[in-house]
Structure formats: C-alpha cells, structure tokens
Amino acid sequence: MCYNNNMIGIDIEKINRFEHWTDEGYRRIFTDKEIEYARSYENCLERFCGFYCVKEAFVKALDDDRIIFSKIEILHNENGKPYINRTPYINEIIRDHFANKIDVSISHCKDYAVAVVLVE
C-alpha cells in the first residue's frame, strides 16, 4: 500500500474492447447508474471505456488490488465533471490510505479512452 499525500493513476484502453461485452459482463464491472448513463449516449462504448479507465486508474493510484470494480461508481456533477461517488466503501478505502480527496478526469476520442485519478 502507498501512504503518501498524493497518489496518481492513469489508464488508457481501446474503446472497441467493449464491443462484444454482454449485459452480464457490464453488470460485473459497472453500477446500474453507470450503465444507464452510458446507454443514454449514442456511442455508449466511449462512456463504458472511460468508466473502466477511471476504475483502473483509481486502483493504480492506490496500488491496492483489494478494490472491487463494481463498488466504484462514477457519477457526474451538475456541470458534467466526473467524480467517484463517495460511498461508505470508497470512504473506507481512501481512509485506509490516509487520503480524503479524489479528483477524476476522463477523455475519449474515436479509438481510445483515458482517465487520470488523483488521490490526495
């Protein structure tokens, strides 16, 4: 585990890796709110890939393989900025790492999505 003040994680994935996922596959990784949000867009695969990148980047930032992807939920504020929902599970994880703030950035283009997570 990492016990310093600033931890950063980044992940990039090809969007087309999500083309053949089944509903069961999505439900193993994503929350109902994430699935609903992603499917509200014409190109939902970009959103699924971006959410996946956030989850990977969060795990990398904390260097903690105990984290369960389906318990990390990415939501958006009123301005559209993504954030990790501070559930009791997430609060416990970041408390274990002596952190209290999580910043998230997601970007995607035609072929790739990328996310950066900063935990302070």
Image (tube, rainbow, N blue to C red):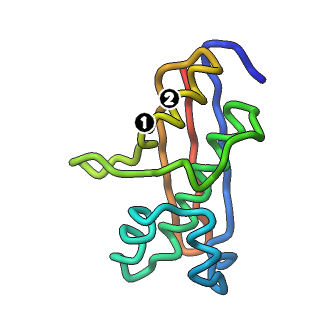
Q: Is residue 77 left or right of residue 5?
A: left
Q: Is residue 109 left or right of residue 16?
A: left
Residue at (66, 48) in percent of width and height: 68
Where residue 104 appears, x then y in whole percent?
48, 40
Task: State yes or no: discs 1 and 2 in contact (Cβ < 8 Å).
Answer: yes
Quarter occupied by the N terminus = top right
Amino acid bearing label 2: Asn
Quarter occupied by the C terminus = top right
Residue at (46, 42) in percent of width and height: 84
Kindly report the distance in space between the C-alpha atoms of the residues bearing marks 1 and 2: 6 Å
Residue at (42, 42) in percent of width and height: 85
User: Residue lying farthest left?
Assistant: 78
* Circle 1 residue: 86
* Circle 2 residue: 91
Query: Which element carries disc 1, helix, strand or loop?
Result: loop
Query: Which element carries disc 2, helix, strand or loop?
Result: helix
Give the mark nearer the N terminus: 1 vs 2: 1
Residue at (44, 38) in percent of width and height: 87
Vertical comparison of 45 with 97: above or below: below
Vertical comparison of 98 with 117: above or below: above
